[in-house]
Amino acid sequence: MKICVAGAYGAFGLKHLDALRNIEEIEVSSIMGPNKSKIEALAKERGIPRCFTELKECIEDDIDALILATPPHLHAGQAIACMDAGKHILIEIPMADSLEDSKRIVQKQRETGLTCMAGHVRRFNPSHQWIRNKITTGELKLQQLDVQTYFFRRTNTNAKGEPRSWTDHLLWHHACHTVDLFQYQTGGGKAVQAYGLQGPINPELGIAMDMSIGMKAKNGAICTLSLSFNNDGPFGTFFRYICDKGTYLARYDDLFDGNNNQIDLSGVALSNNGLELIDREFFLAVRQGRKPNSCVTDVISAMETLDHINSGFEYGR
């Protein structure tokens, strides 16, 4: 299968390129990025035959699918253009930075029947898969999910510390991970209750630097989520699953019990790399002609919850 990675020299474009090296029968035949010298240098370094600066060029190339690791405000237009051209799409999160644009993507997927998947990698991290398996078999019942998403990012930089052309957002770009995961682990569908509080707006970035979110699922489980760009300390996202039969701490691809004893995750998945697992699911769904886990038609409920929370922010101004 021939694919193109758009946004290839960005932080997550590079992560996808690394993951794709481990997946059989996948050929990265082209990459795309708006800076000509950067994308040419990356293509030469990785031995990728073609590189482009415009998405239109990628679509016209001989490829089967694209991974969009581009800025979120471009996702809707790019995803729709790709599907109009008959290409399967994996969109890095968030699938869009508004509910309206997310609905446009879902509508186009339903019209074309192509594989269109959003990169909600938490569904695929072995730590969360282990919890999911226990919930599915009835061995565990989630009562509360307590989550902290912390960064120290007071300037407009990406995960590599480089200046970026678009602005990150705690709600649409970071809370979307936990909102989708909580709804996924509690049976799917929009949370029955959701609210948010945000701190002062940064005058230079135009975004809140601190945020708190609460949710309740249909089955009664609750979630508390704290997010900050002001945390001067260990960064990342840390999950505490409080269940009826134990407490578990998920740190990306690692899992510990409530007493900090590490749990063996061998055998849970083919890889311990969540991003590789989501890429594998995408290509397997394309080959098998089936709906993938994290299809845009499923994760739209997370975007609905985010929109509801965002409306509360607007009301509270």
Image: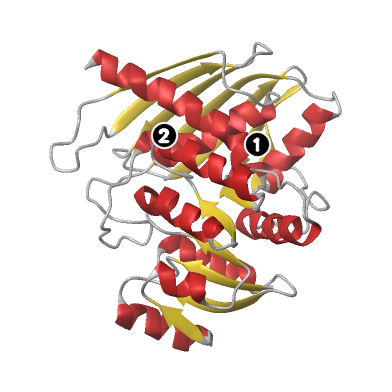
Residue toward you, 293 or 195: 293
Residue displayed at 57% across by 44% down: 120
Three-letter amino acid code of the residue under disc 2: Glu
Q: Position of residue 114 (x, y in %)?
A: 65, 53
**Is residue 244 left or right of 174 when viewed as pictured?**
right
Q: Earlier in the sequence, mark 2 or mark 1?
A: 2
**Vertical placement of residue 242 versus 133, above or below:** above
Which secondary structure, mark 2? helix
Q: Nearer the viewer, residue 206 or 289?
A: 289
- On the rendered structure, is 178 left or right of 51? right
**Residue 179 seen anywhere in this rendered image of the structure:** no
Q: CA distance from mark 2 to mark 1?
A: 42 Å
Q: Residue at x 60, y 28 (%)?
A: 182
Residue type at mark 1: give it: Asn
Nearest the camera: 126 or 240? 126
Q: Position of residue 140 (x, y in %)?
A: 79, 24
When the figure is inspected, residue 119 is found, relative to residue 140, above or below; the finding is below
Q: Position of residue 221 (x, y in %)?
A: 64, 15
Residue 34 position by quadrant: bottom left
On screen, residue 88 versus residue 54, left or right, reads right
Comparing labels 2 and 1, the label whose residue is closer to the camera? 2
Relative to 116, residue 211 above or below: above
Name the quadrant containing residue 101: top left
Q: Position of residue 185 (x, y in %)?
A: 68, 29
Name the residue carrying label 1.
260
| Residue matched to label 2 | 100
Q: Split into 4 quadrants, where in the image is the N terminus?
A: bottom right
SS class, disc 1: loop
Q: Which mark is residue 186?
A: none
**172 displayed left or right of 201:** right
